[in-house]
């Protein structure tokens, strides 16, 4: 069963074609690897799905409901969360506080719980948000860093924090944009294990990465884009051997 699908999805920027008539179906519970050279349309696709860019043509469906051109906060409420290639972490806040921000879409402001609580104590809503955020940090191996300032985090920790912030909103679909960019093998391995945990928890995941080892090891299916067009799709071992992929992405001589 497809949890996310796109039909004829296109995005043009003043004559520049970023994505053209792209069709895709992401099965529930799988990890889809989305690959392609720089400028192939990968991040554009994520931006269209999450409402950060308007669609030029085509339609997007999530859990059989059309979400084309909905605002980002409504798409997030429906169960889609994402990360960014450069983590948008607030350095003046703690690791825990950064993660807690991810639950804003799941809670309305608790007026009575806020103003009628005992001074210098947390409201029940705040306690619930804090506890859920600690649970997610625990699953990502960051429980011991909860009270550290975000400005003190390493690059891999920043990536894991933004993944945690996305997960705390309890998404059905998680979109990860270059989660291992700039990392060495050991750091990349820790992110790889985190992604597998996410899949095992039942969250469908789309991963954009130039790290081909990561993509081939974690993906159930792989889709390759080039100049906004889909050129290959299938099992990792099939896409890895595809002639078009070898030519445009892997550098066939």
Image (cartoon, rainbow, N blue to C red):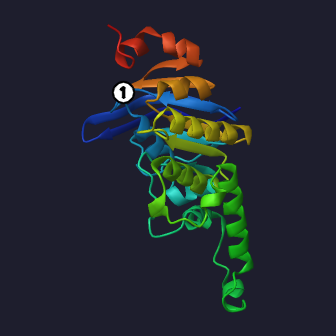
Instruction: Indicate whether 119 appears above or below 183.
Output: below
Q: Is residue 57 left or right of residue 197?
A: left
Numbered disc 1: secondary structure: loop
Q: Can residue 219 be seen in this view?
A: no
Instruction: Indicate whether 15 appears above or below 73.
Output: above
Mark 1 closeness class: few <14, some 14–19, many ≥20 residues within 10 Å: some
Q: In which quarter of the image is the C terminus?
A: top left
Q: Is residue 101 left or right of residue 106?
A: left
Residue under the point 56% across and 36% down: 206
Q: Can residue 212 be seen in this view?
A: yes
- Is 194 in front, or is 6? 194
Instruction: Indicate whether 90 appears above or below 230.
Output: below
Q: Residue 212: x, y in percent?
A: 48, 25
Q: In which quarter of the image is the N terminus?
A: top right
Q: Residue 111: x, y in percent?
A: 66, 85
Instruction: Indicate whether 81 appears above or below 117.
Output: above
Q: Residue 61: x, y in percent?
A: 59, 41
Q: Is residue 250 left or right of residue 217?
A: left
Residue under the point 66% across and 58% down: 143
Q: How many labels does the image show?
A: 1
Residue under the point 60% across and 53% down: 164
Q: Residue 74: x, y in percent?
A: 56, 58
- Is 108 in front, or is 170? 170
Residue bearing the label numbered 1:
37
């Amino acid at each position: 069963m497809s949890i996310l699908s796109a039909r004829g999805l296109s995005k043009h920027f003043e004559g520049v074609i970023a994505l053209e008539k792209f069709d895709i179906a992401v099965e529930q519970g799988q990890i889809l690897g989305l690959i392609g050279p720089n400028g192939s349309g990968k991040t554009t696709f994520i931006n269209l799905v999450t409402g950060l860019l308007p669609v030029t043509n085509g339609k997007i469906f999530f859990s059989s409901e059309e979400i084309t051109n909905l605002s980002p906060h409504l798409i997030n409420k429906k169960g889609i969360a994402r990360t960014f290639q450069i983590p948008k972490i607030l350095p003046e806040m703690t690791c825990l506080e950064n993660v807690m921000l991810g639950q804003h879409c799941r809670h309305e402001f608790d007026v009575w719980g806020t103003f009628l609580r005992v001074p210098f104590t947390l409201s029940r809503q705040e306690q619930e948000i804090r506890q859920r955020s600690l649970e997610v940090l625990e699953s990502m191996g960051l429980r011991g860093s909860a009270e550290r300032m975000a400005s003190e985090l390493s690059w891999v920790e920043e990536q894991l924090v933004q993944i945690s912030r996305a997960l705390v909103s309890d998404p059905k679909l998680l979109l990860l944009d270059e989660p291992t960019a700039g990392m060495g093998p050991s750091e990349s391995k820790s992110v790889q294990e985190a992604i597998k945990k996410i899949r095992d928890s039942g969250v469908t995941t789309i991963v954009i990465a130039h790290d081909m080892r990561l993509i081939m090891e974690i993906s159930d299916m792989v889709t390759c884009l080039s100049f906004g067009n889909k050129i290959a799709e299938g099992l990792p071992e099939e896409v890895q051997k595809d002639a078009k992929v070898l030519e445009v992405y892997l550098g066939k001589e």
